[in-house]
Image (tube, rainbow, N blue to C red):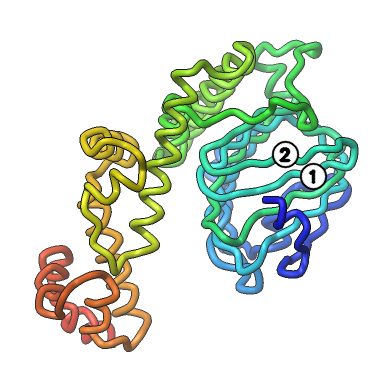
Amino acid sequence: MDKKRRDFTNCEFVELLGTATDVNKLIAVQTCCLDDGRVQYTKHHILPKYGGGCIMNFYFSEVKISISRFKLNKDLIINYDCDADFTQLAFLLEGEKIISLNDIDHEILLESQESYMANMNQLKGSVRISSTKNFKEIKIRLSKIFLSKHGFSTDFEFKKISEKNLILPITNELFSVLTNLEENSLKGISRKIFMEAKVLELLAIQIENYTNDGLNKKSINSSNTIKKLYRIKQILKDNLNQNYSIKDLSKEAGLNETLLKKEFMRLFGCSIADYCKTEKMTYAKDLLRGTQTPIYQIAEDIGYKNATHFSAAFKKYFGELPKQYRNFLE
């Protein structure tokens, strides 16, 4: 972290001034805009100059939900000098970022599976998003009108972004609500009601966490387990040519084998073996569709000893042989 704060040679810079707080307008291009009369939805794809991925936004009832998933080519430094005034809930599911504010002498460091809730007023400073890791974050912006509507008096005090002891781990309870919020497929008034309910649930949980002067030991231990599981998931995704045993992964995570398998299934909704198979087959399909990489090489790239075994696995998964799939595309 210290080195990253000092090194500004491998960075991209963008400026947010005035009341502008939407970085997607600077680093991405809008590819979708839908409005069903209840919830407005937009999707922005990251410009190749900055990397790859997308930012999705949902707007309703003085609420904005942003879901960012991307990988940067270089560290991104966003300089803020904005007059906006709102309360923000931020949940960093993957990645790393550093918040530097002009009026405080410490930096706010966020890593995977960490969160905060704070009043964002007169933002002056910068945010640095690391390019070394995939970045996934859910941010929820609440206006004063929304808070007033739901019973918050004008003298209710949220933490300020500049305060210490701001960062909390993302607990199982929070993660479950975030997953429901992200994966819902409802439409119209049903979606609005559902999303607003989840926002209020997240708000209530975080208020309780801060009221209790942080999380108890059980919650912190839970968060540490989540971080370990996310690290294992990333190792599997980054090394598709390897075939790890549960014993290897258990040693890497510092969790016993039974707990590792049980918690991985609970957190991600599939077994470790099924997750690996899905990632390998999806990557193989992308290579077949987008490249001319020989089938034997694709087999090696995703950890199969030979093309025959890979072809059999691909057919079992997708219902056709790799060669048939590629030929169909041509």
Kind of residue at badge 1: Ser
Asked whether the viewer can see residue 40, the reply is no
Q: CA distance from mark 2 to mark 1?
A: 7 Å
Can you give x and y, in whole percent of width and height, for residue 328 in the image? 22, 83
Q: Amino acid at mark 2?
A: Ile
**Which residue: 59% across, 28% down?**
168
Secondary structure beneath dot 2 equals strand
Label 2 packing within 10 angstroms: few (<14), some (14-19), many (20+): some
How far across and down, in percent of the image, does residue 249 sit? 29, 49
Q: Nearer the viewer, residue 329 or 288?
A: 288
- Residue denoted by label 1: 100
How crowded pointer 1 is (Cα within 10 Å; few <14, some 14-19, many 20+) is rated as many
Please state if 310 lies on the left or on the right of 205 as rendered: left
Tell me which numbered mark, 2 or 1, is placed earlier along the sequence. Answer: 1
Drawn side of residue 284 relative to residue 160, left or right: left
Q: Residue at x 23, y 39 (%)?
A: 257
Point out residue 138 in the picture as x, y percentages from the top left corner: 56, 41
Q: Nearer the viewer, residue 302 or 221?
A: 221
Residue at (59%, 68%) from the top-left corner? Answer: 51
Q: Tag on residue 46?
A: none
Q: Classify the position of the C terminus by image quarter.
A: bottom left
The quarter holding residue 258 reads top left
Residue 241 sits above or below residue 130 on the image: below
Which residue lies at the image location 70% right of the left edge and 47% below the top edge?
A: 98
Vertical position of residue 316 compared to residue 265: above or below: below
- Secondary structure of the residue carrying tag 1 is strand
Quarter of the image holding residue 303?
A: bottom left
**Does 195 sit above or below residue 244?**
above
Q: Position of residue 262 (x, y in %)?
A: 24, 34
Residue to which mark 2 is pinned: 108
Asked if the residue under mark 1 is in contact with the one under mark 2, i.e. CB atoms within 8 Å, the reply is: yes
Q: Is residue 90 visible?
A: yes
